[in-house]
Image (tube, coloured by chain):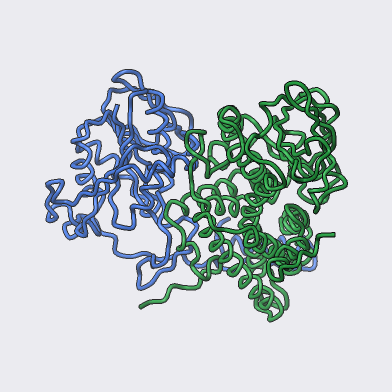
């Protein structure tokens, strides 16, 4: 039998593991990213803006809440398809993938999973069609890795709650029409945490954008301030209480990041490989030198492994069996791998690697954030550490 | 109105194609929908939306592997598809393929047929025109604009020196040029819906056709071989002590070697 040639972009023929439908979804989103998004990213990255002009096209593609039911205007696709969408989006930019992760995993998911019928009917179709943007408020200025320590308080008042507190590092905060805010009811412990849908323009609710970021520049990151914000009873998510609510949302988003990181790694690897074959020194392409081949070989190997982890995680997720520990391992290791690959790609590209137009340092810089957000790299080690030993290192 | 769009598969335009024994070696090369046909598909979907109470049927001549690309067209918004596959069609020429398409399309009662202006593989640009002739329908080629009103149409086409406008009556065949529209990307919802749509497979026998007439063995024109363009000679840098000397050498080379001045 004739052996197919080695495809540097899919050495293990991983794309064959997916259904025709999943491949079509991946290809359609990737084509869009290459043709519509990449030509705009340099300008937006430099300006520090998200390309909002592409929002209708993203919605038309159907990338918001793609696993949710059709009756809300979603595609009811598999979790594997959702993973491949994230991979294709982060091939473009981690900020683009972050936008979709937040909208899908951190806003639409909790409304779908924990919301009332009225909340779902009102918000899901708007969020799916991009007519509304959402954000997720969990992290606070003084509480990152330890969300249970949050200080945002919801005080019961007649007809609803009064919210006070602040949220930090919130993707899409300034853009959002609706914020999912997590707060303790009364001054109770973390078991009293509830989710609230706070709408833009509500009295006492304000936002401020973080400027001068050196990472995720094409993504809007904000602080949220809540000063005596009245939220009516019907805007509280009725079906979840305690840390389980926000943590199950993070599990959704982390799942997508595990795939997205591989998209970024594939981009920086492909870019460095192409450059190595074109760039000549000492009369031949630098990709022919042993040191560069070692780098390329390690990058390609790591991508094969990371994609297979994502694929297996997707299978488990489709069956509803993926555990938070499995999601945590994949998020941590695939992001770490992608960051290493982006930095290595930069070294292969020499001086060109630092240029915005070569894109690899943009990816490397973005991944510094991805490494830290959605559970830091270090905390994810502690999650696996606890699962292995039964001893929780992060408890006081 | 029933709108038919015909599409074909061509080798991926981004693929590096090598020549092996005088023929293009397509092993391992991804097949894609002919880029000009993508404009035809988009135009068909847009016209169906504008007209209302209309649907788009895709017709393709292909093989078992073509179903993936057909599904992609269905994901864009076509309602159903007909896939004509028959081993005898290997090597058939455009006139023969037009006869096959006529047999597949005639029973559909279509108001118009759209196709790309040419396939980017052989660049013949004949199939749509031959189909119009065989159906006895009007034809406008290389269209960049189309308006339908009742049973009549107004089609425009961009010539080198300006725009041409044609009017005529339906049914008709149009071949689309770049610029007529901006083809959409398949949406997730479209892709999920596509799996519920039908692809009817037809052989030559199903269409009542005789392989001895439309099969590759009876082709009047056959593709026999291809060569890559000759490699470009490297350029020559003219040395000289002064600008005057270099210009003199250049003029001499242009006059006596290249003989262009």
Given residues A208 and A228, the one toward you in this image is A228
Residue A10 placement (x, y as % from top left)? 53, 66
Seen at 78% across and 28% down, the residue is A156
Relative to A173, say whether A355 is above or below.
below
Quadrant assignment, res B250: bottom right
Quadrant that contains the C terminus of chain B = bottom right
Taking B136 as reference, is B180 left or right?
A: right
**Hue of chain B?**
blue
Q: Chain A is which colour?
A: green
Position of the N terminus of chain B by quadrant:
top left
Residue A184 vs residue A47, the one in the foreground: A184
The single residue placed furthest to the top in the displayed view is: B150
* Number of numbered discs overlaid on the protein picture: 0
Q: Residue at x 68, y 28 (%)?
A: A235
Q: Is residue A285 above or below residue A234?
A: below
Give left or right: position of B174 versus A150.
left
As drawn, B88 above or below B185: below
Q: Residue at x 22, y 31 (%)?
A: B109
Find residue B32 and report its horizontal and vertical position in percent: 41, 53
User: From what the image shows, is residue A272 above or below residue B97?
Assistant: below
């Amino acid at each position: 039998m004739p052996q197919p040639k080695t495809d540097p972009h899919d050495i293990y023929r991983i794309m064959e593991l997916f259904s025709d439908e999943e491949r079509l979804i991946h290809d359609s989103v990737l084509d869009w990213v290459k043709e519509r998004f990449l030509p705009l990213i340099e300008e937006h990255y430099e300006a520090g803006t998200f390309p909002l002009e592409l929002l209708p096209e993203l919605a038309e593609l159907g990338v918001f809440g793609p696993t949710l039911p059709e009756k809300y205007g979603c595609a009811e696709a598999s979790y594997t398809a959702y993973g491949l969408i994230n991979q294709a989006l982060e091939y473009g930019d981690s900020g683009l993938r972050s936008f979709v992760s937040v909208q899908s995993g951190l806003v639409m998911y909790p409304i779908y999973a924990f919301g009332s019928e009225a909340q779902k009917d009102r918000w899901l179709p708007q969020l799916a069609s991009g007519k509304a943007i959402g954000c997720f408020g969990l992290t606070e200025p003084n509480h990152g890795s330890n969300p249970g320590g949050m200080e945002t308080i919801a005080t019961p008042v007649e007809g609803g709650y009064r919210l006070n507190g602040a949220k930090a590092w919130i993707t899409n905060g300034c853009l959002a029409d609706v914020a999912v805010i997590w707060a303790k009811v009364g001054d109770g412990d973390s078991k009293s945490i509830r989710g609230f849908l706070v709408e833009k323009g509500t009295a006492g609710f304000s936002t401020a954008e973080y400027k001068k970021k050196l990472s995720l520049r094409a993504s809007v990151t904000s602080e949220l301030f809540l000063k005596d914000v009245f939220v009516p009873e019907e805007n509280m998510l009725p079906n979840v209480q305690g840390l389980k609510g926000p943590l199950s949302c993070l599990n959704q988003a982390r799942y997508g990041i595990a795939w997205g990181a591989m998209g970024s790694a594939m981009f920086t690897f492909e870019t460095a490989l192409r450059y190595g074959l074109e760039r000549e020194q000492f009369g031949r392409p630098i990709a022919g030198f042993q040191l560069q081949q070692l780098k390329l070989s390690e990058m390609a190997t790591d991508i094969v492994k990371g994609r297979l982890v994502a694929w297996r995680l997707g299978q488990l997720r489709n069956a509803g069996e993926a555990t938070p520990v499995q999601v945590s391992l994949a998020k941590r290791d695939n992001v770490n791998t992608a960051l290493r690959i982006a930095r290595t790609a930069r070294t292969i590209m020499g001086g060109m690697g630092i240029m915005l137009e070569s894109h690899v340092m943009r990816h490397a810089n973005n991944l510094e954030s991805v490494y830290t957000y959605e559970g830091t790299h270090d905390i994810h080690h502690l999650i696996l550490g606890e699962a292995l030993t039964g001893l929780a290192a992060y408890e006081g | 109105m029933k709108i038919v769009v015909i599409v074909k598969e061509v080798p991926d335009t981004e693929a590096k194609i090598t020549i092996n024994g005088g023929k293009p070696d397509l092993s391992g090369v991804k097949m894609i929908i002919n880029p000009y046909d993508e404009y035809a598909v988009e135009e068909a979907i847009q016209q169906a939306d504008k007209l209302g109470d209309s649907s788009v049927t895709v017709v393709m001549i292909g093989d078992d592997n073509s179903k993936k690309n057909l599904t992609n067209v269905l994901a864009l918004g076509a309602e159903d598809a007909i896939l004509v596959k028959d081993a005898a069609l290997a090597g058939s020429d455009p006139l023969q393929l037009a006869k096959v398409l006529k047999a597949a399309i005639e029973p559909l009662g279509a108001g118009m047929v759209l196709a790309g202006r040419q396939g980017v593989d052989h660049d013949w640009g004949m199939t749509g025109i031959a189909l119009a002739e065989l159906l006895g329908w009007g034809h406008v080629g290389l269209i960049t604009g189309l308006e339908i009103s009742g049973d009549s149409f107004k089609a425009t086409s961009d010539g080198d020196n300006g725009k041409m406008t044609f009017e005529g009556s339906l049914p008709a065949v149009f071949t689309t040029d770049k610029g007529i529209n901006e083809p959409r990307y398949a949406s997730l919802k479209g892709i999920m819906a596509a799996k519920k749509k039908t692809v009817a497979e037809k052989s030559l026998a199903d269409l009542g056709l005789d392989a001895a007439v439309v099969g590759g063995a009876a082709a009047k024109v056959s593709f026999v071989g291809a060569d890559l363009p000759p490699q470009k000679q490297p350029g020559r840098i003219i040395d000289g002590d002064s600008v005057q000397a270099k210009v003199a050498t250049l003029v001499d080379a242009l006059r006596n070697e290249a003989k262009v001045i």
